[in-house]
Amino acid sequence: MAAKTINITLKIWRQKNSKTEGKLETYKLDNVSTASSFLEMLDQLNEQLINEQKEPVAFDHDCREGICGMCSLYINGRAHGPDTGTTTCQLHMRMFNDGDTIYVEPWRSRAFPIVKDLIVDRSAFDRIQQAGGFVSVNTSGRTMDANAIPVPKDDADKAFEAAACIGCGACVATCKNGSAMLFVGAKVSQYALLPQGQVEATQRALNMVRQMDEEGFGNCTNTGACEIECPKGISLDNIARLNREFLKASLKSEK
Amino acid sequence: MSVLDSKIPEGHISEKWTNHKNHLKLVAPNNRPKIDVIVVGTGLAGASAAASLGEMGYNVKAFCFQDSPRRAHSIAAQGGINAAKNYQNDGDSVYRLFYDTIKGGDYRAREANVHRLAEVSGNIIDQCVAQGVPFAREYGGLLDNRSFGGTQVQRTFYAAGQTGQQLLLGAYSALSRQIGLGRVKMYNRHEMLELVKVDGKARGIIARNLVTGELERHSAHAVVLATGGYGNVYFLSTNAMGSNVTAAWKVHKQGAYFANPCYVQIHPTCIPVHGTNQSKLTLMSESLRNSGRIWVPKKKEDAEAIRAGKLKPTQIAEEDRDYYLERRYPAFGNLVPRDIASRAAKERCDAGFGIEANDTNEGVYLDFSTEVKNKGKQAAYAAGDHNPSEEKITQLGKKWLEEKYGNLFQMYEKITGENPYETPMKIYPAVHYTMGGVWVDYNLQSSIPGCFVTGEANFSDHGANRLGASALMQGLADGYFVLPYTLSNYLADDIRTGKISTDLPEFEAAENNVKTQIEKFINNKGTKSVDYYHKKLGLIMWNKVGMGRSEEGLKEAIAEIDALKAEFHSNVYVPGDANELNPELEKALRVADFIELGQLMAKDALQRNESCGGHFREEYQDAEGETLRDDENFKFVGAWEYKGEDIKEEVLHKEELKYEFIKIAARNYK
């Protein structure tokens, strides 16, 4: 597809740090190649700002191939922008037209406080993982042969699909309740579907849900926006499975 | 004798590691909590090391510059991880994995290290499955495998095109468990900017809190670097934007030798460059070469017509396509090692057969149409249809492709706007992995006592060229199964040392050193951005220290980098403050180190008057354009010693490589 160039107007959230108030600033940017990624467009803006001796826009990014989960951004009111099944780093400027005005905001959620400009703090996800997102085997390599327990392909595939979550937080940012159920559901599902996860299933479901609540994430009301905006297509089935696992765990637990 | 003591244990190759482990010193469980260990980097090598050491009971502090340890760039590895399990009954063994890796590395890796890697490879798979890593499985419930370049067996375990992600999340889960238990303290958004040595030993680091800008002193009895490779010296590479050499370079400047910096892996299958604003290159997994056939048009006029948009690749008849890898290397075909596939693509494009309409016409096709037919037919037969229509075959074949490579095909379409199920992918080589790195002995210890280096950051296991699916193997082997033993051996002498104070003058001096560098950049008030210089460096490196190198070009590169270094330090502009989140400052500190490293890479490439693996000196090739190694004069690891600001003054030390168990031979994939 032949690339062309477009001129755009950007409305970008600027905020010095977590203690100050922020506001939208307007920038004009010309000659943006439609073959560029959205973040390359922001690089171009920053280069322009630096040349004007102004402070560039801070945003999170790293792998730029849609897998590390570090990039975020609310673009024109949608997490990761107008394309589906994609992260912001894989969103390309061919999705936009000459003369467009594009709004760029950080994730909006109580559990993800703003650090600077478009950067938010998602360490709540790490703490949920620390509460139970693991199998407690030691790392000796002396467990048992990897093929000792056959796993039905269908279960393995579903576990993989759940494990494909990149932890970007789009589900939370999109949810009107700021719920992290899709993220937690995906992690709990991965282990619930595999024999290796069974031993600690009860504690895992209880502990991860408890931590999720403590972090200030909202409740799930089955709107389904998270599934639509998830760049990795994590299915709502995982929330259903989390609910089952949590119910099962609550009934079984003696605590 | 060389100053480099590799500490390779005595004995037969298959017994070295076992015997060595049996004689290493141990630290008793009750002593471990008295000992502090710093791990920098949380990719496969770092996360696995931190988790293992935490579990053993050491006090671990782990650092990463990303907002979470789960984001380290191991996560982007696509295709798979090798292990000598022989689940496919195709004659694989520890010896064969060892042999393939040595040969793949063009006989420039240590036998003992590589054999150890092959020995523990099976444990990695056992470990990961036990942790709940969802590898691909067959219908019978057992693990599936595929082939990678440079091998004739199927030993690669995978999880779609996201194997690195699944393995890293496995290691991250183990690390998270230790963080939750309080045995590992995690420092996200922290970057190591200096190593602190006390009495010649590594005893801590200076790290910058990237959110507040504060410089922090952290002490420990040992420091482990698992900080990845330095491919971003080229600006454009498949590395993450933040991947950098700074931690490794700082220990080099503190006295650790830097080995084989010129060994860089240029990966053959990446999406070609689109324009000047390009910030990074995206890999299309080597696993695609299981199913894709690489070609360019046989006729130059066809290539020209394609570039001009007058012809489509699907319009080129079978007999007018040059499947150049199958033509040149019939025994391995499209699955030759990466360095060979890359050079072959460059050869065709330099000859005028490239198909991409960008500035350089650099691109070749990776075509899945043959596989669609084969697999579609198989799928139809498997479903009982022994007379399937063409459409049915195509439909089933595409479905098969989607199952195997769905995420890669989707990624390709997002980036290029073209549908690879219908038209061949356009690909071209790009900088991917660096075999060189900090010199370490068999125990993974650098030439600074107490400073250990693991994963891509060290030089040890891949020689001059890494085989596909071996990086994940090495990262996890180092972190789970090697370092916990060898580091304990070192720490056994520290059980009575007690806490290392961060008030020592060495910490103060190191912190001041970092502070001075930062202030210099902030107060520089130049006119050009950091990226401006980074891109300039990248161009010099790609053109003169890239896929083809010559004496003349390397000398030019060294001189040009000298000039670039001076200009960068006098004219770079870093906006903002030191005491806040400042991405431009982070980049400036990294690029300063890349510039110095780049010069050392050129210097290393210049001294190595031979071609081997990823290092191709144009003067040293045979009539068919294959690499000409010089085993008589260059069968050594080249380790460089820092001698002050001027990188041109660095001194080379040689570690002679001995091949006792594998007969050294010309590398032949024909």
Image (spheres, rainbow, N blue to C red):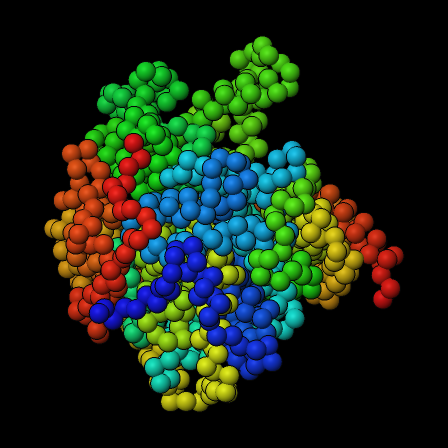
Instruction: Kindly indicate the quadrant of the structure image that contains residue B268.
Output: top left
Q: In percent of the image, x 40 and y 48: which residue is there? A: B98
Q: Quadrant of the N terminus of chain A?
A: top left
Residue B31 appears in view: yes
Q: Position of residue B629 (x, y in %)?
A: 20, 46
Q: Position of residue B651 (x, y in %)?
A: 19, 68
Q: In percent of the image, x 27 and y 57: which residue is there? A: B657
Q: Position of residue B664 (x, y in %)?
A: 27, 47
Q: Nearer the viewer, residue B173 or B654?
A: B654
Q: Nearer the viewer, residue B83 or B92?
A: B92
Q: Is residue B66 above or below residue B348?
A: below
Q: In percent of the image, x 20 and y 54: which residue is there? A: B634
Residue B272 appears in view: no
Q: Nearer the viewer, residue B578 or A66?
A: A66
Instruction: Kindly indicate the quadrant of the structure image that contains residue B446.
Output: bottom left
Q: In percent of the image, x 51 and y 65: which residue is there? A: B49
Q: Position of residue A150 (x, y in %)?
A: 67, 42
